[in-house]
Image (cartoon, rainbow, N blue to C red):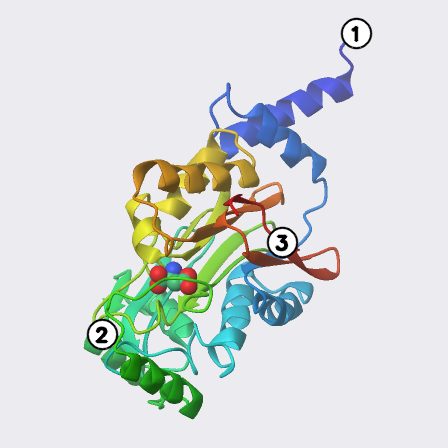
Amino acid sequence: MTTRRKFLSASITASAAAMMGLSSKANQKTIDNYKSTTVIKPLIISTWHHGIAANEAAWQVLIQNGSALDAVEAGVRVTESDPTITSVGYGGSPDSDGHVTLDACIMDHLGNAGSVAFLENIMHPVSVARKVMELTPHVMLVGDGALMFALENGFEKENLLTPEAERKWREWLNKREDVPQKINEQYHDTIGMLAIDTNGNLSGACSTSGVSYKYRGRVGDSPIIGAGLFVDNEVGAASATGLGEAIIKIAGSHLIVELMRQGDSPKAACKIAVERILKKQKITKQLDAAFIAVNKAGETGAFALRKGFQYALYQNNENRLIDCDFLIE
Ligand code: ASP
């Protein structure tokens, strides 16, 4: 006999499916996950080992019932101002001409997005991206325009080239390597961060100095909504790290969110995105890419093209660095 409780549960499941924009055929897996999360628990997932420190700051926001948006901004700012991280913000590797140029973006649970690319001399591009989102009718500002906007909004000009980054750049210059540069772990490590807050809302952000010694003017995936980051509060969110060109060509983060909408788990969706790169693009030794994702039910996952990618997950009061599964040894 169908009990009243079962009936109610079925109705709730159906309306949850409708709210999440899922097709009836594909939704069961995601709905099951959704049902299993009776109480919404905050969580943060971010890329690479530097995600651990970034997660700590983001967690402080979430446990005080702060928004996922505030959390991801606070988290990413930690990485941006750490001079020991040579792939993001202050201390980031410069372009081939010695200028540090930064890309960042942010997206909230309402689908609002802001982004900056090729921005120089500003310590916290993620915060400028947020201002673009909140104060302008635009999504993206680049180069001098992004800098002008940042200065107009109270950001200060700073020299982001640390003596150590300059020393390494000069060493590279002496070796006279060609551009575009090889991509490997040493040369890239964007911070991408996704969070769910206590209201169950999702937001994400990412920030990078891009591929080391890149050609002046080159912009990667990280400030491109749909490539380096995508958030759909009804379904989930995804973010990327690795060779930006490869990620842009498959609209990686958007692809993953759409796969989750069809019922794939976050990990399965990330794996399909990596396989898509493998199938569609010429795989050189230099090509690497990895994705992180979270769905509305609070299920997380990641997948990398190559061995070595790690991501940081803060959940249930525990902040862990996790070795990611991969396709190629
Ligand atoms: N995705 C970044 C870019 O291509 C690099 C990285 O993730 O490390 O600019």
* Contact, mark 3 vs mark 2 (Cβ under 8 Å): no
The residue to which callout 2 is attached is 143
The quadrant holding residue 14 is top right
Mark 2 C-beta to ligand 1 under 8 Å: no
The amino acid type found where label 3 is placed reads Asp
The amino acid type found where label 2 is placed reads Gly
Secondary structure found at label 3: strand
- Foreground disc of the pair 2, 1: 2
- Distance from disc 1 to disc 3, alpha carbons, whole Å, reads 47 Å
The quadrant holding residue 250 is top left
The quadrant holding residue 71 is bottom right
The residue to which callout 3 is attached is 323
Rendered location of residue 144, percent (x, y):
20, 78
The outermost residue toward the front is 175
The residue that appears at 28% across and 82% down in the rendered structure is 173
Chain-order first, disc 3 or disc 2: 2
Q: In which quarter of the image is the N terminus?
A: top right
The residue that appears at 41% across and 78% down in the rendered structure is 92
